[in-house]
Amino acid sequence: MKFYTDDLFKKVREKRKSEKLSLRKLESFFGIPDTTISKWVKDIANEDPNFLRSQKLVNETKKRYLPTFNINNVSTKKARLICSIFYWCEGSKYPSSNCIAFCNSDERMVSTFLFLLRKAFKLDENKFRAHLQLHNTHDIKRVTSYWSQMLNIPIDRFWKPTITKPTNTMKRLNYNGTCTIKYFDVKLLQGLMGIYENFGYIRRDA
């Protein structure tokens, strides 16, 4: 995978904002594939036909599928299944872990998992702990407060963050570090794993 400097990333975004160039023109100007550029500037509105076509498709898809599912109204049974699948993908497994440990940099994924976990099971909130992996360029107090409010976990249950120096590669826009949520209950961990293992079982003789 090829990486690009953070400075180049900012220049591409600024060029899109100021001159409203199409993806093809940005590709020609910077020598970067338009597929890469499209990810960098997808939030910047303009009159590019490709952008308008993409936005129209996204809006039509939302209208078609969003009304069919509302996570706030999901049943306890379904919450357990969806939560376990989330954990199957991103959680630490027993016996290498003796607690529920879910780690991701996508705050929506972490908060959704936590919402489902709380909805699906009766929990002791005192068993939660959180750990952040941040860059030395982050405002530690601000980012910790941000995660604390989003996850509804008190700041005093956040362990001291791990701080690293960012490499000279392209960074994701509005990156707020990586968060690991831990809930200390090995029986619940095994229960979550049991749900997705049963769900994912494929009969070989079927």
Image (spheres, rainbow, N blue to C red):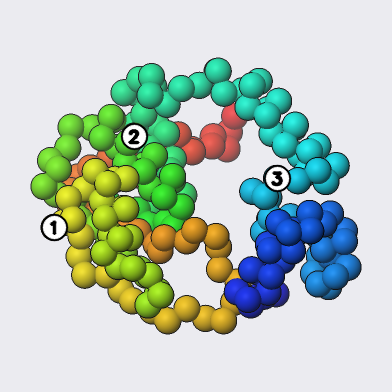
- As helix, strand or loop, the secondary structure at mark 1 comes to helix
Q: Where is residue 109 in the image (x, y as percent from the top left)?
A: 44, 46
Pointers 2 and 1 in contact (C-beta within 8 Å): no
Q: Earlier in the sequence, mark 3 or mark 1?
A: 3
Q: Position of residue 186 (x, y in %)?
A: 20, 50
At a point 20% along the width and 60% down the height, the residue shown is 158
Read off the residue under disc 2. 116
Q: Which of marks 2 and 1 is nearer the N terminus?
A: 2
Q: Is residue 137 visible?
A: yes
Q: Gap between marks 3 and 1, in whole Å?
A: 40 Å
Q: Residue 144 carries which label?
A: none
Q: Position of residue 65 (x, y in %)?
A: 61, 23
Read off the residue under disc 1. 156
Q: Position of residue 104 (x, y in %)?
A: 42, 56
Q: Gap between marks 3 and 2, in whole Å?
A: 33 Å
- As helix, strand or loop, the secondary structure at mark 3 comes to loop
Q: Which amino acid does label 1 sit on?
A: Asp
Read off the residue under disc 3. 45
Give the answer, above or below, for where 14 lies relative to 203. below
In this view, the mark in front (3 or 1): 3
In the rendered structure, the answer to whether residue 202 lies left or right of residue 176 reads right
In the rendered structure, the answer to whether residue 108 lies left or right of residue 30 reads left
Q: Which image quarter is the N terminus in? A: bottom right
In this view, the mark in front (2 or 1): 1
Pointers 3 and 2 in contact (C-beta within 8 Å): no
- As helix, strand or loop, the secondary structure at mark 2 comes to helix
Q: Residues within 10 Å of mark 2 (few under 14, many from 20)?
A: many
Residue placed most toward the observer, 7 or 152: 7
Q: Gap between marks 2 and 1, in whole Å?
A: 23 Å
